[in-house]
């Protein structure tokens, strides 16, 4: 949420690094963009409402340049998304520029203090207080002024600060991600690795309450008490091609197509025959309860995980929205395994839930995609998804890999507990990439079905048991990228409310696998049909009873129940994608959303 990029050492920092980096970070927010550069004429700032292309196309942007600069793409928190509220923010004298990701919770009190001292504010943002605080404390050392400022700040921040007369960028973090990129006589700061990948693969993850000064050919890192710290340099494994669209119209479409390979990567080295090998730091026999915490699509993966883990391992599982878990004084102890699921590994609520669980002595496990992310470094142990970078704001391949990983985890725990597992499950996991390829190959059919439904304004998604969360995820995907209202419901619960809405204008999407719930779900279809509701059915059964009831049927391969949510979800991704793109929406950057939600 909000993207930061900065660099020192490039001759033409604006075009070489800042604009390019901002484009890479746009998935973190795209309400406005801005940059600040130290030029021979002093500090210059340009900000534009809207996407990075607005900033890039601006004449002023093209006129300024220098070798020290910072830039920001914003997802608005405080203040509407206009030019004034865009970052970078400056002090009264216009010598200091700050970009910030996070929220300064006590900004109002700080602002009042600074206003009373005579500081003049231009924007409604929380961030501007940082620029004025640094101005207040600045004598002749930017790092010292930033350190003193941050001592007054409550909340979360990842910041980069520059000042006229200082040949460095000062960066700091608490709660919001910041990485440093190490180049040859060049240094970078960014909120996420894709922004620097074109320049360097060597990165340093800044920890909470650390502050760094970046110079052309060196850097220093200290904690906020002034003690020097040494952080390891890591090599980013992602390649440049992985963060390009590779000929696809959207990242989302590319990532949907990548699912077979992503799942193969998630399984690689972890499954052999029926045996699963995961390196986790808990003993299954000591675990009496599992609590899954996550947000958004990852929460839906968690709901599926509950069905899988409970059924296979016999351990009770609850699934919680991380934003609720963190504040309700949850009852967890050393015999509880708290599993955090997160694509980005940076979601603020999920991170806070992990910290709360750790504080209470629970064992924590991360199911995370982004290596080096904050959550992945906080948990006791973890299983990385290896799905590759997910850039499209709506999560697709990460979800498939999360559910795949949860199945692996369930098998792992069963092995630990000497519980038998049906060999079908491991065998189907290995076949999964090929089966998903079959579903993707059928996308033209889904596209033609989507054409019939793109004018509808409301949808109901219905499923039972392990496929109820798939209904939730299908509805979320449609909402996120098409702005069409959609609700996911347990098919059996439909008659307790949603059925009142059924008429020819409200289509229902049924997830109807070949399992124990099949006949019951058909009954629910009858109830919809009796009220002239349109029906799209996702099923693995070629059955006349169903084809008579459903207006449109999408066939998927038959797999064991534990794997079926992964397969059943794929057509729902394509349905949402085709409906949204037919409406002309940029599905990679749907309005009001951001990929990495690093604020509460
Ligand atoms: C945002 C994204 C969703 C994602 C959720 C959780 O809302 O738009 O796609 O599922 O955050 O993100 P995480 O990175 O923790 O999985």
Image: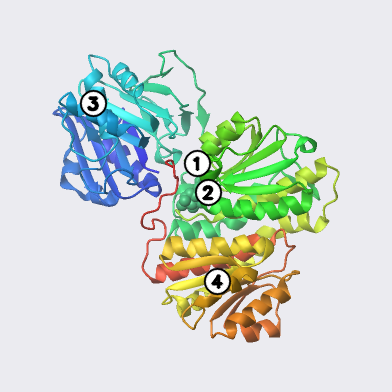
Q: Look at discs 3 and 1 and give the one toward the viewer.
A: 3
| Residue at (52% x, 29% y) in the render | 234
- The quadrant in which the N terminus is found is top left
Q: Which residue is mark 4?
A: 497
| Crowding near the residue tagged with mark 2, few <14, some 14–19, many ≥20 C-alpha atoms within 10 Å | many
Side of 454 where 385 appears, left or right: right
> Marks 2/1: CA distance?
8 Å
Side of 347 where 303 appears, left or right: right
> Marks 3/4: CA distance?
52 Å
**N-terminal-most mark, 3 or 2:** 3
Q: Which residue is mark 3?
A: 113
| Residue at (38% x, 61% y) in the render | 586
**N-terminal-most mark, 2 or 4:** 2
| Residue at (68% x, 46% y) in the render | 268
Circle 4: element type? loop
Q: Position of residue 124 (x, y in %)?
A: 24, 41
């Amino acid at each position: 949420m909000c993207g930061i990029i900065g660099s020192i050492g490039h001759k033409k920092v604006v075009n070489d690094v800042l604009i390019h980096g901002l484009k890479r970070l746009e998935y973190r927010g795209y309400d406005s963009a801005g940059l600040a550069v130290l030029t021979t004429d002093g500090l210059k700032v340009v900000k534009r409402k809207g996407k990075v292309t607005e900033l890039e196309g601006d004449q002023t942007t093209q006129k300024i340049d220098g070798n020290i600069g910072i830039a920001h793409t914003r997802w608005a928190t405080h203040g509407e998304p206009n030019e004034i509220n865009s970052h970078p923010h400056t002090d009264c004298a216009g010598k200091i520029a700050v970009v910030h990701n996070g929220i300064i919770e006590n900004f109002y009190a700080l602002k009042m203090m600074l206003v009373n001292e005579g500081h003049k504010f231009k924007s409604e943002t929380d961030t501007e207080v940082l620029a004025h605080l640094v101005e207040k404390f600045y004598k002749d050392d930017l790092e010292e002024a930033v350190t003193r400022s941050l001592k007054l700040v409550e909340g979360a921040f990842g910041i980069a600060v520059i000042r006229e007369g200082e040949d460095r960028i000062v960066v700091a973090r608490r709660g919001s991600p910041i990485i440093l990129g190490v180049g040859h006589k060049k240094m970078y700061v960014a909120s996420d690795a894709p922004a620097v990948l074109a320049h360097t693969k060597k990165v340093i993850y800044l920890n909470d309450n650390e502050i760094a000064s970046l110079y052309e050919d060196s850097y220093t890192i200290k904690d906020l008490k002034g003690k020097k710290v040494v952080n390891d340099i890591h090599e980013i494994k992602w390649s440049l091609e992985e963060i390009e669209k590779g000929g696809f119209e959207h990242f989302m479409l590319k990532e949907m197509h990548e699912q077979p390979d992503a799942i193969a990567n998630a399984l690689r080295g972890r499954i052999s025959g029926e045996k699963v090998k995961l390196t986790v730091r808990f003993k299954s026999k000591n675990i009496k309860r599992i609590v899954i915490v996550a947000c958004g699509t990852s929460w839906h993966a968690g709901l599926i995980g509950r069905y899988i883990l409970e059924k296979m391992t016999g351990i009770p599982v609850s699934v919680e929205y991380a934003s609720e878990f963190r504040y309700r004084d949850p009852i967890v102890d050393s015999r509880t395994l708290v599993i955090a699921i997160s694509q980005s590994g940076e979601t603020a609520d999920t991170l806070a839930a992990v910290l709360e669980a750790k504080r209470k002595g629970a064992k924590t496990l991360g199911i995370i995609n982004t290596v080096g992310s904050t959550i992945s470094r906080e948990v006791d142990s973890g299983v990385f998804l290896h799905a590759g970078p997910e850039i499209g704001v709506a999560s697709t391949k990460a979800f498939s890999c999360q559910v795949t990983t949860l199945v692996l985890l369930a098998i792992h725990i069963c092995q630990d507990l000497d519980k038998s597992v049906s060999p079908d499950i491991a065998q189907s996991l290995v076949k999964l990439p090929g089966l998903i390829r079959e579903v993707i190959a059928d996308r033209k059919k889904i596209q033609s079905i989507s054409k019939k439904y793109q004018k509808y304004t409301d949808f109901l998604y219905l499923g039972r048991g392990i496929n109820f969360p798939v209904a939730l995820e299908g509805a979320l995907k449609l909402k996120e990228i098409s702005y069409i209202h959609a609700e996911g419901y347990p098919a059996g619960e439909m008659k307790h409310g949603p059925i009142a809405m059924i008429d020819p204008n409200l289509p229902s999407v049924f997830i109807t696998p070949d399992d124990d719930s099949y006949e019951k779900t058909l009954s629910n279809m009858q109830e919809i049909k009796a009220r002239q509701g349109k029906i799209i059915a996702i099923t693995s059964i070629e059955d006349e009873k169903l084809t008579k009831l459903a207006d449109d049927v999408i066939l998927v391969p038959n797999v064991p129940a534990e794997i079926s949510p992964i397969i059943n979800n794929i057509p729902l991704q394509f349905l949402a994608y085709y409906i949204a793109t037919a409406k002309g929406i940029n599905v990679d950057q749907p309005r009001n959303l951001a990929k990495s939600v690093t604020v509460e």
